[in-house]
Image: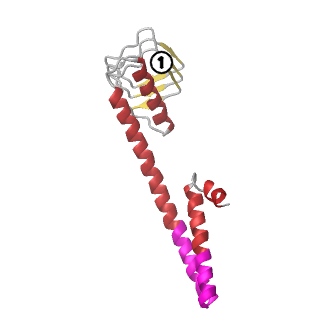
Amino acid sequence: MWNRLTGWTKHSDFASSLVAAVVIGALIVWLDYRYGINWPDVQVEMHGLLMDIFVFGGLILALNKMREKQNLKRHYHEEIEDFRDWKSDESKYRILGNIKRLARLGEKRFDLNRCNLDGVHLKGLVIEDSDLNCIDLANTHISECTFKNVNFIGAQFGKALIRCSSFIGCQI
């Protein structure tokens, strides 16, 4: 039974907080019953404790999630930096995977200068205020992408297939 109880709390911070609040509440009720403290006093303290747990716990949880998201973004940007200037198939797919992960996290700014994305498929990306100079996009399929204020100076678009994409304020 204990494994069943803890199993569903492992994947959710909120569930863990809820279990902690219930355990603390039960402990307070048990101490009150054992030592004969007035029930109205316990209720007041328990309400205060639960409010503290939910308010401060929620605040800490939100800040932790924001920090985690920023750390993920930084990690993906660092991986792109690690594969910059490589001319292998592995590097271009690793860079593309990191671009897609960053896009899912809401990132729109990229530093992809000197990256090799020859022959990949870019679909549905929104890239704004970014540096893509000297990027290799030869033989690339670009569809449904939006590029806004992007620097493409020195980029290679040889035999690239571009469909339903917009280039707004870009330097090409």
Residue 115, percent from left and from top? 35, 22
Quarter occupied by the C terminus? top left
* Residue 114 falls in image quadrant: top left
Vertical placement of 42 versus 133: above or below? below
The overriding secondary structure of the stretch rendered in magenta is helix
Q: Residues within 10 Å of mark 1 (few under 14, many from 20)?
A: some
Q: Which residues are magenta?
A: 26-54
Taking the image as drawn, is residue 40 in sight?
Answer: no
Type of colouring: secondary structure
Residue type marked 1: Val
> Does any portion of residue 136 appear in the rendered image?
yes
30 within the magenta span: yes
* Residue 162 included in the magenta stretch of the image: no
Q: Quadrant of the N terminus?
A: bottom right
* Residue under the image location 37 percent in, 33 percent down: 79
Return the residue at label 1.
120
Q: Residue at x 34, y 21 (%)?
A: 86
Q: Position of residue 91 (x, y in %)?
A: 40, 23
Instruction: Report the residue at 51% width, 36% height from top.
Output: 104
From the top left corner, tell me how far across and down residue 89 is, in percent. Answer: 42, 18
* Picture coordinates of residue 20, whole percent (x, y): 56, 67
Mark 1 element type: loop
Taking the spot 58% from the left edge, 79% from the top edge, the residue there is 28
